[in-house]
Image: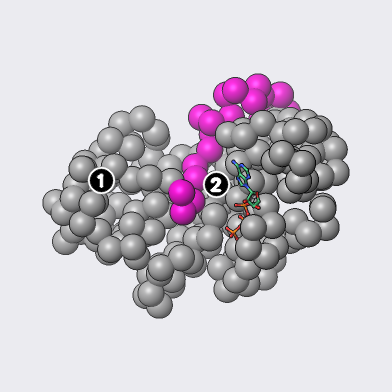
Amino acid sequence: MTITTEGLGKRFNREWIFRNLDTTFIPGAIYAVTGPNGSGKSTLLQVLWGQMPPSKGVVTYARGGTALSGEDVYRHVAVATPYMDLIEEFTLEEQLRFHFSLKKARYGLSPADMLERMYLADARHKVIGNFSSGMRQRVKLALAFYTQADLVFLDEPGTNLDDRAFTWYLDGLRQLLTTGCTVWVASNEPAEYPAEAHKVDIMRYK
Ligand SMILES: Nc1ncnc2c1ncn2[C@@H]1O[C@H](COP(=O)(O)OP(=O)(O)OP(=O)(O)O)[C@@H](O)[C@H]1O
C-alpha cells in the first residue's frame, strides 16, 4: 500500500507537533521516524494509520493502484506500541487465539508455531497479567510480526528487550521486510532499524 501525505500537520491545543509533511511512503520500504522524546513520533504514526485525525492536510491510501478509504485502512494495519494493552486475564495462548480469530496470520503460522518462534512456548498457559515487561513486549511484537498486514507500525520496539530478545526482534524485522509490507519504526536508537531505513526526522517538520 502506498501512503501519501500532503501538507500534513497535527497540533494539540496551540502547539504544532508537526506540519507541512509532504511524503510518499512506498510499499516494501522501511521508515525510521526519529526525534527526541515528546517530539511527535508516536503522534505521526497514529495519524498515518488513521487512528488520529490530522489538524491540517490529508493522508491518502492506495492499494494496487486503487484508492482506499481511510476508514478501511485499519484492516491492513498491524501495530506494536507501548500504550497498546494486552488482555491481562488471558493466557498467552488465549491471547494469540483471540487475536488470530479476528486477523489473518502471516506465513501460514498457527498459534503453536508462533509460541515456538517467540521462545514463549513454556509460558503458553500463563496469564498475561503475570508476564514481565520484556515478555509483554515480545508478545506485542509477535502480534505485529505475525499478522498479515500491508502496514506495520512499531513504536519503540526495543523497549525492555534483553540481548536474546533483541536479536529475535531484528531477525523478525528482517523477515518482515522480505514480505513487501511497509514498516515504520519510531525510535531514537539506530540499532532498532536497519541502515537502509529511510529517515523521517520529525524535527524537520516543526
Ligand atoms: N492526546 C494528546 N493531547 C495533548 N497532547 C498530546 C496528546 N498526545 C500527545 N501529546 C503531546 O504531543 C507531543 C508528542 O508526543 P508523542 O508521544 O507523539 O512524542 P514521541 O516523540 O513519540 O515521544 P517519546 O519518544 O517520548 O515516545 C508531546 O508533547 C505530548 O505531550
Q: Earlier in the sequence, mark 2 or mark 1?
A: 1
Say which element carries label 1.
Answer: loop
Residue positioned 83% across, 36% down in the render? 6
Q: Looking at the picture, does residue 161 appear above or below residue 83?
A: below
In the picture, which quadrant includes the N terminus?
top right
Q: What is the span of residues highlighted in magenta in the rendered image?
A: 63-83
Residue positioned 79% across, 38% down in the render? 8
Image spot of residue 148 (x, y percent): 46, 40
Residue for badge 2: 152
Q: Is residue 88 left or right of residue 79?
A: left
Label 1: how many residues lie within 10 Å, few (<14), some (14-19) or many (20+)?
A: few
Q: CA distance from mark 2 to mark 1?
A: 23 Å
Image spot of residue 129 (x, y percent): 23, 52
Q: Nearer the viewer, residue 129 or 108?
A: 129
Q: Nearer the viewer, residue 88 or 95?
A: 88
Q: Looking at the picture, does residue 19 appear above or below residue 115?
A: above
Residue for badge 1: 88
| Extreme residue toward the left, this view | 125
Q: Looking at the picture, does residue 120 appear above or below residue 61?
A: below
Q: Amino acid at mark 1?
A: Glu
Q: Amino acid at mark 2?
A: Val
Residue 79 in sight from this viewpoint: yes
| Extreme residue toward the front, this view | 14
